[in-house]
Image (cartoon, rainbow, N blue to C red):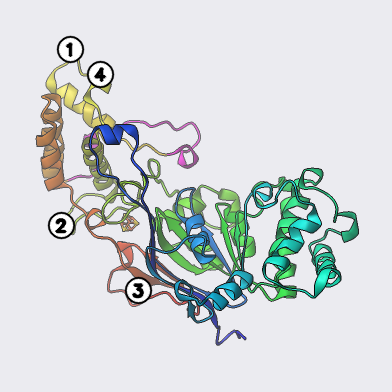
Amino acid sequence: MATEHDPDPLVEIENVSKLFDLSQGVVDRVLGREPQPVRAVQNVDLTINEGDIMGIAGESGCGKTTLGKLLVKLYEPTDGTITFDGRDVTELSREDEKMFRQRVQMIFQDPFESLNPRMTVFQSVVEPLQINDIGDGYRDRRERVTRVLNDVGLSPAEAYLNEFPKELSGGERQRVAIARALVVNPDFVVCDEPVSMLDVSIRAGVLNLMKELQDEYGLTYLFISHDLSLIRYMCDRTAIMYLGDVIEQGPTTDVVTKPKHPYTQALFDAVPEISPDAERHRANVTGEVPNPRNPPSGCRFHPRCSKIIPPEDWTGSQDAFRRAFNFKRSVATGELDVEDVETDHVEQRVAVDRLLETGLALELPEEHRLEGEGKGSVDVRTLDMPRRAENALRSAARDLLEGDVQAAEEQLDREFQTICEQQHPDLRRADEQITACHLYESSASNTETITPDASD
Ligand code: SF4
């Protein structure tokens, strides 16, 4: 049994990756492109202690649902090891596999998907008992079903036994789904966005119920959610995912109130009501989540990061470097199109200024803009930037105006290099958290390379 000082790990995830080989589209096949696997989960290390509620948060497509499905064996990992109660789940004997299927359950976002519309509540909830060969005949199983329905607040249970899902409200359906998961008396339940499809007014009731059931049934939970207020309310520990990586993890209070990774800061910055009393800083993240088929090199967050690190010999401001790097990326990705900038019938000097004004502006997503703020533009002369860098930008802009994109790219690449683009950051300790960001690779005493352990 876990104690405060000696927690027992129930689930240990070591260096787990999951690749999906997506088949090519017609255009890919015609152009002879190789299929590109998507790395949905990348080298994830995580430990979930017995009795804990672990939260996994991140934007849609970050890999959190894939991770949940790996933990219940709906997917097999491509690399790495998942251990449940000390046993590698990919190497279970038939008997242990049966036991695993009973001890580990999943609650899905949409109760309509997890409940068969042609089965009554009784049939849905008794089915896991039949599959797992639990219970001593019909009477015993009916008693177990009745008990769990009462436990999940569907009381009196007899009134629900013969109902079909379509006759229930959304909240009642999700309670049936919870009952179906709990009737086999599991130890570990993965909850994938369990209340996101419910009316806001009944979410708190279902969440409180799940907390009560945790004590009553002795459960360990993994909560997957994009809803940061839910994570904050429910979870002891939280891991934040971005493009398949866990980029920060630690006690929820610390992750919420003192986020270390710039992406975590951006996530919480976009949800001001999460910490109304906390000192807010504008995370200033740019752009959209990149395509996971073709993730950025180095730190996967670098194209959007407000804290991207200039090289050691950079003498200008970080903001100026970030804008120059943004210009470099927009040229490399083709996002900056000379055709879109009004450069006809003006002197080259003016055309260069206009191109730089557009390319150096930062496009903030709506949730990070100040009131009334648009994309804006910026005059390169106002930036705190070394003369050499400004000259490189002007020269690259001239190349672009002359149609020599390759020369522009090479020049910008030589001039604006960053460790964030070149090296994937290792996990480091930063106060109570563990985070993957080059900012925490200094020799400061509170940072060190680390392998995550939920007891930390
Ligand atoms: S490694 Fe660089 S780009 Fe990535 S989060 Fe840290 S500062 Fe930002």
Q: Main secondary structure of the magenta part?
A: loop
The CA span between labels 2 and 3 is 23 Å
Q: Earlier in the sequence, mark 2 or mark 4?
A: 2
Quarter-wise, where is residue 312 in the image?
bottom left
Image quadrant where one finds the N terminus? bottom right
Q: Residue at x 54, y 80 (%)?
A: 85
Write the start and end of the magenta stretch as one range.
Answer: 365-385
Considering the numbered disc 1 on the image, is that residue within a helix, a strand or a loop? loop
Q: Amino acid at mark 1?
A: His
Q: Residues within 10 Å of mark 1 (few under 14, many from 20)?
A: few
Left or right, 53 with reference to 27: right
Per the image, the residue denoted by label 2 is 313
Q: Amino acid at mark 4?
A: Glu
Considering the numbered disc 3 on the image, is that residue within a helix, a strand or a loop? loop
The CA span between labels 4 and 1 is 9 Å
The CA span between labels 3 and 1 is 55 Å
Residue 342's tag is 4
